[in-house]
Image (cartoon, rainbow, N blue to C red):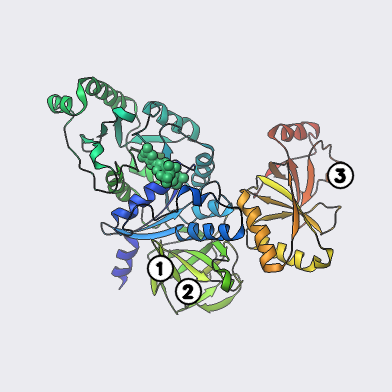
Amino acid sequence: MANDLRTEINRRRTFAIISHPDAGKTTLTEKFLLYGGAIQTAGSVKGKAADRHATSDWMDMEKQRGISITSSVMQFEYDGYCINILDTPGHQDFSEDTYRTLMAADSAVMVIDAAKGIEPQTRKLFKVCAMRDIPIFTFINKLDHEARDPFDLIDELEKEFGIGTYPMNWPIGCGVNFKGVYDRDKRCILSFADAHKGRERLGAIECEISDTEKLDELIGSYQREELVEQIELLDGACFDFDLEKVRHGKLSPVFFGSALNNFGIETFLEHFLKMTTAPLPRKTEGDTLDPVKDGFSAFVFKIQANMNKAHRDRIAFMRICSGKFERGSEYLHVQAGKKLKLSQPQQMMAQERTIVDEAYAGDIIGIFDPGIFAIGDTVCDPSMKIKFEGIPTFAPERFAMVEQIDSMKRKQFTKGMNQIAQEGAIQMFFEPEAGYERVIVGVVGELQFEVLEARMKSEYGVEFIRRPLAWQYIRRISNDVDPKKLDLYETEWVQDYRGQNFLLFKSEWFITRTLEHNEGKLELVEFGQ
Ligand code: G4P
C-alpha cells in the first residue's frame, strides 16, 4: 500500500506552461495531449482564434471562461508518467489567477517565439516562477519561420532572467532553410522534413555529426560547416549541464523546435520528464511536508465562480501536496476549523470534467464551494492541523474607480464588492475621505474588471460606473507615517479594508520623485510584503 502510494506520487509531474500570447502555448499543449492519447484531433484544446478573442458580452465571456477553465488543468498519461498541465491564460484572460496557478506547479515550461524572444507576459510569469525557484524548461518555437540568431536568444534569456541556459539541441537554419536540430545529448541530427507536418509522429533521421557525407546529403555542405562551427562554440562557451541547478531553477534546459509541425516535441517530453521532479516538499507554517510520507493535504489556489450559470456554482481548485485523497473521506478545512466530506471532487481529464474517487500528491482537484473557501486555505487529514504558507498577493497594475449608480442598492453593492474581493478576484481600495459608495478597484488584467461587472449584475443585481484611472504602481507605507503630512504630487493616498495605507503612482518617475521630496520621512514597501 505504502509502495503503491510512493509509486503513484513519484510518477506525477505537475507543470505550468507559460508564454506570451501567440508564442505557441496552445499548440504545444495540444501536441503533448496528442502524444498522451488524451485527445484525438488537433484543434480541440481551444476554439479558433476568432472565438477566443470575443469577450464582448457575458455569454461570450462565460463561454470563453468555460473553455479556458476546461483547458486550464489537464491530466494525461505518457510513458508511465501521470502528467498534470496547468495552463496560464493569455492576455485576454490574464488575471491574478494566472499568477496563483503558478503556485500549484512544480516546474514550468516557457514557450518562446523564436522570432520575438522574450515578450512582456513571459517576463511577468517568469518572475513569479523564479520567486519559488522552480525548474524552468525553455521551448523555443516556430523555427520553421524566420527566427533570431539562436546565440542571441539564449544570451537574452541569461541576461534578462539572470539564469544559466543549457541548449539540449541546436537548430540548423530556420524558415525555409530549417533543416532540423542537432541533439547534443545523443550527438545526432533530427531532420525536419516538411512531409511530417501535422499530427503524425516525427520521422527522425539520425546522423552523427562526424558523418560528413551523410550530413552534406541531409543539410548541404554550407549548413554542415556552420553547424559544426556553432556546436564547437557551444561546447566551449556554454554552461555545463548540472541537474541540481536545473532542479533549483538556476539553469534552464533549452529546446528548439516547431510545435505546429510536431517537431522536437517527443525529444522535449523525453528529456523534460526525466529532468523535472516529482511533487516537491511544500512549506507549511513552521514545517515542511513530505509528499509521500505525510497524510493528505492540499491548498486552494484558485476559486472559479459561475462555471455553470444555472447552478451558480463555485469551484475551488486545490493542489494536493501530500498523500492520497479519497472521495467521501472526512477532511479538515483548517481556516474554518470545520470537518468536511468532499463527495463530488472533479478532475479535468483533457476535455472532460470527471468525478474522481482518488487522487495523489501532484494532482489538482476541483471541489464544489458553497462559499466557504478562500485562496490559500488548507484542507488536510484531521489529525494534521497544518497551514500552508500563504499565497503571495500580487501587485495590481490597472486601477478603476467604481461607483454605484443606484444609491438604494448600497447594501448589495457593498456585499457584492466585499465578497468578490474576498474571493481574491479583485483588490479593493478606499479613498479615506470618500464614502463607501465608490471604491478603487485594482487588478492585473482587464478581464477581472469585466468579470466583476458581470458578476455584480447577475449575482447581486447591481450596476456601476467604472472609470479607468491612470495609476500603474502601488506601494505600501507604514502606518506611523501620516499621509496628510507628505509632499504628494500626482499621487493618490488610499487604504485597504484593514486601514493599511498605500500610495498610487502613474509611473516609476513619480515613485522616485515622492521618495526624494519626502526624504527621511517615508519608506515605500512593495505590495504584498
Ligand atoms: P498561444 O496559445 O501561445 O497564444 O499560441 P497558439 O498555440 O494559439 O499559436 C499562435 C499561432 O502560432 C497560431 O496561428 C499557431 O498555429 C501558430 N504556431 C504555433 N506553433 C507554431 C510553429 O511551430 N510554427 C509556426 N509557423 N506557427 C506556429 P494562428 O494562425 O494565429 O491560429 P490558428 O488559426 O492556426 O489557430
Q: Quadrant of ligand 1?
A: top left
Q: CA distance from mark 1 to mark 3?
A: 52 Å
Q: Left or right of 465: which side holds 78?
A: left
Residue at the (58%, 66%) spot, across then down = 306
Residue at the (41%, 30%) spot, across then down = 153
Q: Which residue is mark 2?
A: 381
Q: Amino acid at mark 2?
A: Asp
Q: CA distance from mark 2 to mark 3?
A: 49 Å
Q: Is residue 363 visible?
A: yes
Residue extending farthest front: 50
Q: Amino acid at mark 3?
A: Lys
Tell me the crowding category of disc 2: few under 14, some 14 to 19, or many 20 or more residues within 10 angstroms, Cα based: many
Q: CA distance from mark 2 to mark 1?
A: 9 Å
Percent across and percent down for residue 486 are 84, 40
Label 3's element? helix
Q: Which residue is mark 1?
A: 323
Which disc, if any, is residue 401?
A: none
Asked if 463 appears above or below 20 in the picture, the reply is below
Q: Left or right of 304: which side holds 42?
A: left
Which disc, if any, is residue 484?
A: 3
Q: Amino acid at mark 1?
A: Gly
Residue at the (29%, 41%) spot, across then down = 263
The reply to whether discs 2 and 1 touch (Cβ–Cβ < 8 Å) is yes
